[in-house]
Amino acid sequence: MPTWSRKFAFGVAVVALTAPVLATHSWSTYHWKRTTSELTVPTGDNVDLRWDSYLNMAITDWNQSAVINSAKVAGSTNPKNCRGVSGTIQVCNAKYGQTGWLGIASISLSGGHIVQGTTKLNDTYFDTAKYNTPAWRALVMCQEIGHDYGLGHQDEDFNTDNTASCMDYTSVPEGNEHPDAHDYEQLLTIYNHMESATMTIGGNGRSAGAGFAEPGDTPAAWGRPVRFDRQGRPIVFVREEAAGKTITHVFWAIGEGPRRSR
């Protein structure tokens, strides 16, 4: 990571120590195993030209963290199903249909750690006038990749806009296209330790998605819902797998998505 990036990340940490304490927003305890000073999980580019600049921006933004330095690499999966590849984050776009969601992030866990991640961006919605804007594209791209690193939401009420973070559910994407200081602080907390390289799972040459099914496009494929947003919609699902489990985080379109029965 360039020196100026490290200085920026250090400054974020200092600001966090002097600013009011905000709620933590890790995505449970999910994280990759970090065996060096920086997490270098490569990000696979399976997106088309409409998304390239947003993927580049999100990778650059998340690399501002003192503990992340992920390179963009050629994609290794079919964008339509976006099957995970061990040791990587694969980012895909396609017309996934009238599913109700703008984006999903799925992480597969083995031995309690993330071993692969995927981000899917639904062009069925992003091709419409409502969502085909730079702000919406940047927000959802940034948020789904943030989930793949283990971050949760800072706020889960679409009726509010309490942060300047892409890790926020909001109906006002403008001003929420990037991570904020609290996101970088949370990453420092999540990745506050290193582990032995001999304990690393993933990135070991296994075949794409070995032991794990593709993410799927509907709640029926994601397993059981375990978390709901302020509107009562399921946003986190758990699916038991032969090799471990897959967790999926859903960014529903405004007014879409199933509601929890009362």
Image (spheres, helix red, strand yellow):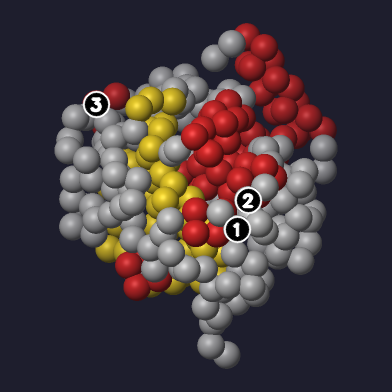
SS for dot 1: loop
Q: Is residue 104 left or right of residue 201?
A: right
The answer to whether 23 is drawn above or below residue 198 in the figure is: below
Q: Report the residue that reaches farthest toward the top.
A: 3
Q: Residues within 10 Å of mark 2 (few under 14, many from 20)?
A: some
Q: Amino acid type of disc 3?
A: Thr
Q: Which mark is residue 205?
A: none
- Name the residue carrying label 2: 132
Q: Residue 134 in the image: x percent, y percent?
A: 67, 42
In which image quadrant can residue 3 be found? Answer: top right
Q: Residues within 10 Å of mark 3 (few under 14, many from 20)?
A: few
- Name the residue carrying label 1: 128
- C-beta proximity under 8 Å, tags 1 and 2: yes
Q: Amino acid type of disc 1?
A: Thr
Q: Amino acid type of disc 2?
A: Asn
- Name the residue carrying label 3: 198
In which image quadrant can residue 86 be found? Answer: top left
The answer to whether 211 is drawn above or below residue 8 in the figure is: below
Task: Please indicate, yes or no, whether residue 258 appears anywhere in the rendered image.
Answer: yes
Given residues 92 and 183, the one toward you in this image is 92
Q: Residue 13 in the image: x percent, y percent?
A: 70, 28
